[in-house]
Amino acid sequence: MKVAAIIQARMGSTRLPGKILKKVLDKTLLEYQIERVKRANTIDEIIIATTTKESDDQIVRLCQQLSIPYYRGSEEDVLSRYYEAATKFNVDVIVRLTSDCPIIDSNVINKVVGHYLENRNQYDYVSNTLTRTYPRGMDTEVLSYEGLKRDHEQARERTYREHVTAYIYHHPDQFRLCNVLNEKDESKHRWTVDTEEDFQLVERIISTIYPENNFFNMSDVLHLMDQNPTWFDINNHIEQKYV
């Protein structure tokens, strides 16, 4: 059984274009994320799902440089991009990640994926986002290829095509859902990168902690935030775009 992390990535972000190739300590945010996902022992392969747009040639070049498999599909129909990528690479279990989470913790990925694998006969979809207790930026969603295929075949509305798994968690009567909770509610933290303020915070986190500990985890970042409480104010006013 092949478990693959499929990371959707494009340069055309509406609020912060080109964000995933912005650099901190001379390394792009996408490289940090790939480095961290590689540490998850539940993941067999990482696949970057980008678009056919010319602007995303930069992402393809980075994948080639890092020897990371990639797939190019529709920019707007991200669901089809995921389905086609999973089909091309013969993926059995899809771990959906987004490329705006450069400090995602491999331990969190392992926890969510592990819960799915241990209970895959009971659930179609397992994530840590249905009820938020993890910081934004730790988002991990897991589903089977069969579940993704059903999603692809049944989801018709544009918002469901753009947001990949939205049809699944909006139809609990059709899909068996499970949420993984953190021991403590840390959902107030925002470590995803969607705006310039988000980038400023993540830049501070990486610049401070990475040179001393490039294996840092979520607990290390929480400790760093406790030591620097004013950092929370950098982006706590940013509103998440909702589906």
Image: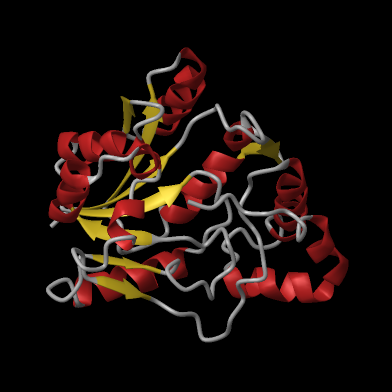
- In percent of width and height, residue 18 lies at 61, 29
Q: Residue furthest top?
A: 54
What residue is drawn where x is 41% and y is 61%?
140
| Residue 187 left/right relative to 43 | right
- In percent of width and height, residue 162 lies at 39, 39
- In percent of width and height, residue 34 lies at 46, 46
Colour mapping = secondary structure
What residue is drawn where x is 64% and y is 58%?
191
- Of the 4 image quadrants, the one containing the N terminus is bottom left
- Is 34 situated above or below 103? above
Q: Residue furthest bottom?
A: 183
| Residue 31 left/right relative to 165 | right
What residue is drawn where x is 77% and y is 47%?
197
What residue is drawn where x is 45% and y is 63%?
106
Task: Tell me which corner region of the image, top left, top right, bottom left or bottom right, holds residue 88.
Answer: top left
| Residue 39 left/right relative to 79 | right
- Is 83 situated above or below 18? below
